[in-house]
Image (cartoon, rainbow, N blue to C red):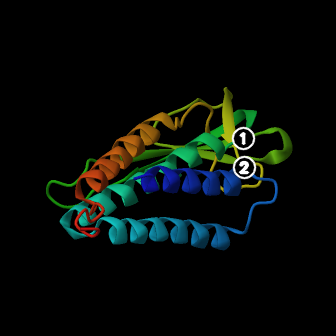
Amino acid sequence: MALPVSAAAAVYGWVHWYLAGPSSPPTAVAVAGGVLLVAGACAAYVVRVGGTGGFFGVLFLAVGLLLTVTAADQATARAEVATCVVGAVHTTVQASYGEGGPPEKTVYRLELRCPGGYPAELKDDRPLAAVGEEIAVAYDPQRRVSPAPEGGSSPWRAALWALVLLAAGTEIARRCAPGPDVTAGA
């Protein structure tokens, strides 16, 4: 069944066009189109496979397609790099409440002085640079996604998990999809 691979290629192409294309659609149109692609692929999968296998397979397909979106975002979203000087570093501690909750988290917000004035700030959960130091910042010139440290996000982890889940969905479809009726011509 080629549906998971075809759906992943379509979703990746759609997200890449939105994030890197010179004539990309408005965000609302891009999100709506992406939702329709994912929902359409999932509906086609359920119709084709059906049963319990179809239920679990469509879960793998949906998560695999969302990971494909993540991989495309991380691969194409921040096309420009600027070398910026850190003007100030502000830290904020986000408390955790409740028993067994996650530990406190410290967020570092760097005020930046970059050529052209953008990006103006960078947030991360680790200290990236001290005041006065230079830092390479990857950013989207059309400002659709937040800036990030250069090399800070790699698409490989999301792409690998997407591949694993899409392969699992394909295998479930191969095993559970109804075959042709061999008694129909008898």
- Say the numbered circle drawn on residue 20: 2
Q: Is residue 57 left or right of residue 151?
A: left
Q: Dot 2: what SS?
A: helix
Amino acid identity at mark 1: Ala
Closer-to-camera residue (43/173): 173
Amino acid identity at mark 2: Ala
In three-dimensional space, the C-alpha distance between marks 2 and 1, rounded to whole angstroms, equals 8 Å
The residue at which mark 1 appears reads as: 79
Q: Is residue 154 left or right of residue 80?
A: left
Q: Is residue 144 above or below residue 120?
A: below
Label 1 Cα neighbours within 10 Å, binned few <14 / some 14-19 / many ≥20: few
Q: Dot 1: what SS?
A: loop
Closer-to-camera residue (169/12): 169
Q: Is residue 3 left or right of residue 75?
A: left
Residue extending furthest toward the left:
99
* Image marks 2 and 1: residues in contact by CB distance under 8 Å: yes
Closer-to-camera residue (155/78): 155
Residue at image coords 39%, 60%: 62
Q: Position of residue 109 (x, y in %)?
A: 56, 46
Label 2 Cα neighbours within 10 Å, binned few <14 / some 14-19 / many ≥20: some
Q: Is residue 137 visible?
A: yes
Q: Count up the numbered dots.
A: 2
Q: Is residue 15 left or right of residue 49?
A: right
Q: Locate the C terminus and report the quarter of the image it occupies.
A: bottom left
Residue at image coords 35%, 41%: 164
